[in-house]
Amino acid sequence: MPDSPAAARALQLLTLLGGQAEPLAASRIATDLGLARSTTYRLLAVLADQGYVSYLPESRTYGLGVAAYELGSAYSRQAPLARIARPLVRRLVDRTGVNAHLAVLSGRDVLYVIEERAPGRPALVTDVGVRLPAPVTASGLALLAALPTAQVRALFPDASALTGSAAGAATASSPATPTALRRLLVDVRRRGHAVEQGSVTSGLSSVGRAALDHTGHPVAAVAATYPDDATDGPARAELVRAVTGAAEQLTRRLSLRTH
């Protein structure tokens, strides 16, 4: 079993705070976990810096932070989402014979929730749990195109938001400025689906389409990835229809789930 005492203590601390009705003082946390106060304060400082713990100066106590709430909310969204979407993604693979996946938007990135590999197809970098910059991927472009323009502008206010560390995987074919991104999203909205060609992996392209909830908000994107040299025009058109159909089915299922 992997041995990481610091990680174990941090998780124990979060579990303790999550089980309390009220925030706790550092001394109480140290006692309950059997830790030295110095160790407790170091753990609290790290977790607070990452947003998982909040310090309440009035009572000199600690409670769960916004990041802990977001993590729990993400699980509550993604676990049912994966159950609903997995049969659709599998059918998409069976229909097209290429790899398919489901991704959700997480800040400026996409997070892959489902990856289904077709027989004989190579593994992709888009495995479950992998994050990639949204503007680089078909899934991300599909999701961004479905967001209000103001929200996209807030996510990518300037070029540094596209070329910084979060966008380190960007390539020459991906947008380098907010203006270029906006033009790309206009094209996605016009076509009804997103396409990326070699931005993630050389020689592979992807087509993606967003699935919406009952309010019209993009919840996830369905995408399929294919070799550039193995898909002609008619085959690509059929692939677009298959991805579109899967995304529309997921949209209907998500709408039913919210009523």
Image: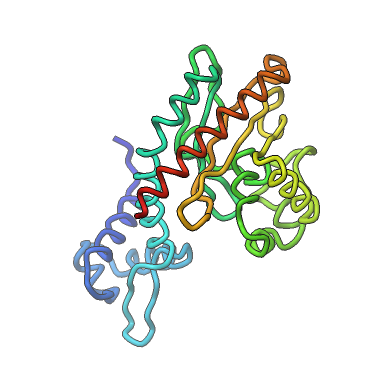
Quarter occupied by residue 64: bottom left
Q: What residue occupies the far top of the structure in this picture?
A: 120
Left/right of residue 74 with respect to residue 23 in the rendered view: right
Q: Position of residue 1 (x, y in %)?
A: 29, 35
Near-viewer residue (76 or 236)? 236
Q: Position of residue 163 (x, y in %)?
A: 73, 51
Q: Is residue 201 above or below residue 213?
A: above
Q: Position of residue 70 (x, y in %)?
A: 42, 60
Q: How many marks?
A: 0
Coloration of the structure image: rainbow
Left/right of residue 230 with respect to residue 256 in the rendered view: right
Res 200 seen here = yes
Residue at (71% x, 26% y) in the render: 202
Q: Is residue 152 above or below residue 187?
A: below
Position of the C terminus by quadrant? bottom left
Q: Position of residue 9 (x, y in %)?
A: 30, 55
Q: Is residue 99 above or below residue 57?
A: above
Residue at (46% x, 26% y) in the render: 116
